[in-house]
Image (cartoon, grey):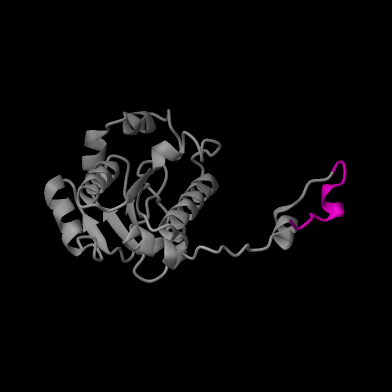
């Protein structure tokens, strides 16, 4: 184990991220990614669902997860709300916290893909730069972005958690679509408007054309 510099742990001082990074070394593992994929008998993939609150991201991700599981795929679903109960419970809703939320989710998804899982991620992820950062973690063909493009008026009409109502009267700040922007994906691999097509049809389209998911 590499020792941390004495100067970085002196009483009354704190180790900075830069100092930590200078001391961290990548530890090579004997079991390679390819060995894990061979054992799983599938290729790992990240399917990233982005869209407004109430657009149907989690519902669609859950339905696709169930369909893939039914075909024998090894999957895992990372949901934005669920991660905020644990891994990301220390983060707020300000722009910098949202960026960190997506960074953490992307890194977890990357580890799961390296293990050979098909990982479904349902996050509002409102900023293009944050989604691009997650995409950059993966090799070609490992990342599928699904823009759940359900219009704001429909999402707000659903308001399943009562959040839009609270945001409109100022009880919630930095709420995407009301007081905080949502940047529409530039080039998603897939677009679904849950106000215009059924859940079953959307799942069937993803299964049929989703980068070999049906194979």
Instruction: Note whether 29 is above or below 86 in the view shown.
Output: below
Q: Residue 190's image quarter?
A: bottom left
Observer-nearest residue: 178 or 197? 197
Whether residue 56 sits left or right of residue 21 in the image: it is: left
- Residue 176 screen position, x and y as percent: 38, 43
Q: Would residue 197 be visible to someone looking at this image?
A: no
Q: What's the residue at 43%, 57% (across, down)?
A: 115
Out of 124 and 63, give the one closest to the viewer.
63
Residue drawn at x 42%, y 45% is 180
* Residue at point 70%, 54% (across, down): 17
Where is residue 35? Give x, y as percent.
43, 65
Expressed as whole percent of the image width and height from the top left, the position of residue 150 reads: 23, 48
Of the 4 image quadrants, the one containing the N terminus is bottom right
User: Of 7 and 166, which appears nearest the observer?
Assistant: 7
Q: Magenta part mainly helix, strand or loop?
A: loop
Question: Which residues are drawn in magenta?
Answer: 1-12
Q: Is residue 101 left or right of residue 126?
A: right
Q: Quadrant of the C terminus?
A: bottom left
Q: Is residue 196 magenta?
A: no
**Residue sitting at the far bottom:** 140
* Residue at the image position 79 percent from the left and 55 percent from the top: 3
Q: Find out whether residue 5 is within the magenta segment.
A: yes
Give coordinates of residue 96: x percent, y percent. Answer: 54, 48
Residue 114 position by quadrant: bottom left
């Amino acid at each position: 184990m590499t020792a941390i510099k004495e100067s970085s742990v002196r009483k009354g001082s704190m180790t900075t991220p830069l100092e930590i990074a200078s001391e961290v070394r990548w530890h090579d593992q004997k079991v390679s990614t390819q060995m894990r994929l061979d054992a799983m008998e599938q290729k790992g993939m990240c399917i990233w669902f982005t869209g407004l609150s109430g657009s149907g991201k989690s519902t669609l991700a859950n339905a696709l997860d169930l369909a893939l599981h039914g075909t024998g795929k090894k999957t895992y679903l990372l949901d934005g709300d669920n991660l905020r109960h644990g891994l990301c419970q220390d983060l707020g809703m300000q722009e910098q916290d949202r960026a960190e939320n997506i960074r953490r989710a992307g890194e977890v998804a990357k580890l799961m893909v390296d293990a050979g899982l098909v990982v479904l991620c349902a996050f509002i992820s409102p900023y293009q730069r944050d989604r691009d950062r997650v995409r950059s973690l993966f090799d070609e063909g490992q990342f599928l972005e699904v823009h759940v493009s359900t219009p704001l008026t429909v999402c707000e009409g659903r308001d399943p958690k009562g959040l839009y109502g609270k945001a409109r009267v100022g009880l919630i700040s930095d709420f995407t679509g009301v007081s905080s922007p949502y940047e529409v994906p530039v080039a998603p691999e897939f677009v679904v408007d849950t106000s215009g097509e059924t859940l079953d049809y959307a799942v069937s389209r993803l299964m049929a054309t989703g980068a070999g998911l049906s194979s």
